[in-house]
Amino acid sequence: MNVPTENHLTEEQLVLYYYSEASETAGVEEHLGACESCRKAYHSLQRVLNSVDSLPVPDLSADYETRLWSALDARLGRRKSFAARWLLWKPLVIAASMAVLIIAAFLTGRTLERPSNQQKSVADSGIRERVLLVAVGDHLERSQMVLVELANAGAPATGHLDISYEQRTAEDLLEANRLYRQTAASAGDFPTATLLEDLERVLLEIAHSPSTVSAKQLEDLRKQIEDKGILFKVKIFGSQVEQREAAPSKAGAASL
Amino acid sequence: MEDTDSVAVARVKAGDGDAYRVLVDRHSRSVFRLAYRMTGNQQDAEDVVQETFMRAYRQLHRWEARSSFSTWLYRIAANYSLDLVRARKRHAETAIDETPANQGAPDDAIHALPASSPGPDRLLFSDQVQKCVASTLDELSQQERTAFVLRHFEGQSIEEISAALGLSANAAKHSIFRAVQKLRRALEPMVSHAL
């Protein structure tokens, strides 16, 4: 970059010089040494940018890292038992087991039910619902993680973005989702069945996407997630499930 | 630092989850500073930090040791901050009609400072500048704000910023120029007047 004194430095050159990004620092310095007008402009820029540094950032407490780690550790689930971690990675097995359990409980309840034993019937129904509630809640949480990952993935600056991890997870979740949907439908829980049907379509799209996607493909995928509003529905439904789990006594009568 | 980051990441990948704490301890405050400058809100910034480390943990297989771990973290934090700020703005736009008109502009608060504040003139000026910086940053587009914050406060190069934001180097550079122009327009009369 040649910087003759008769041609004043542009604001862009001054900004780049301030941030040590100028392609020819020596040329700019030489010009600033010789040209009062540019020197004034640069000092003015310096004052403005230096004043930006006055913007305060709140002080964090001394135990910030400890508090953060506690919160992260709980969310990362690293302290879960081997069994819990195994289950986390085997949604299909969980789903199948739960489905068998629910159907068995449902059939048992119907066989043993007596018109005079109303209390027992209500209790059985509550247990069945609670089993489904816990299983679906866990399933929705895992599904939400995949959807959030994709909805917020940074656009690939160059080339493609590897979504093979999300894809594999979506494939696993898809199988589980089918079983939960069928179970919910057969138990007459239509709101749950409808949500799971919507979720299934999105999981299917993810599972069938290429394992590496371009920015355009990623955008299309995001659009499908957004258009169906599935992330929002899953979040709302998930929080409802959490509330119901927290209040098991109320879980008897209504659907999920 | 980066070498030790690589070692910690390798340990996490090998199944030593506690090694992740080393990375959290090392980088959380700088991620917080970035997030705060992006969002302008402490609670949001703390949420961004937590979410950034969650995402980084889940996407650790995507990090390539040849790039800087902190730059990669900043990229995640900057993108999540952008999403959060966009969501907040959408929410604010829908809620604005219901907001009473007596909230007052930020500048009004300056005049409401107690007269007993120590060193009132200097403090008032400094407070005014800070408020002006904050409100000008709020007026920048998200791309301008992110590029500027990464360049000015975090010392990231234009190349790193373009990679973080998925922009060309030229677009990143121009985002910074536009941000500086806007800050200059807002602050120059104030800081020149002070001298």
Image (tube, coloured by chain):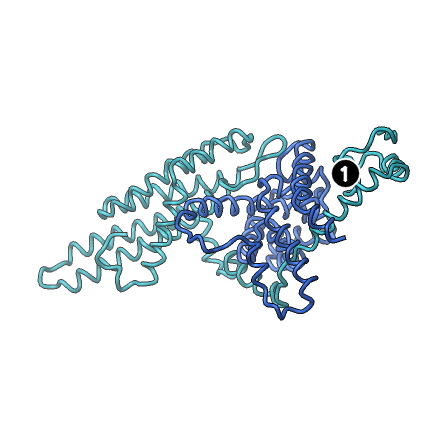
Chain colours: A cyan, B blue
Place of residue A146 in the rendered image (x, y in percent of width and height, measured from the top left): 47, 44
Residue A98 visible? The answer is yes
Asked if residue B40 lies left or right of residue B92, the reply is: right
When asked about the image quadrant of residue A38, the answer is top right
As rendered, which of A184 and B128 lies closer to the eye?
B128
Where residue B99 sits: x, y (%)? 42, 52
At x 50% / y 40%, what residue is drawn? A150
Give neighbour class at mark 1: few <14, some 14-19, many 20+ (Cα, 10 Å). some
Q: Nearer the viewer, residue A8 or A16?
A: A8
In this image, B184 relative to A41: left or right? left
At a point 33% along the width and 42% down the height, the residue shown is A196
Number of callouts: 1
Q: Is residue B19 visible?
A: no
Residue located farthest toward the bottom when viewing the structure as drawn: B116
**What is the chain letter for disc 1?**
A
* Picture quadrant of residue B32: bottom right
Residue A19 position, x and y percent, is: 76, 43
Residue for point 64% across, 47% down: B74
Q: Position of residue B129 (x, y in %)?
A: 66, 53
Eyeballing the image, is A85 above or below A220? below
**B9 vs B67, nearest the viewer:** B67
Q: Amino acid at mark 1?
A: Leu
> Disc 1 designates what residue?
A16
Quadrant placement of the N terminus of chain A: top right
Give SS at disc 1.
Answer: helix
Instruction: Answer above or below: position of A113 versus A165.
Output: below
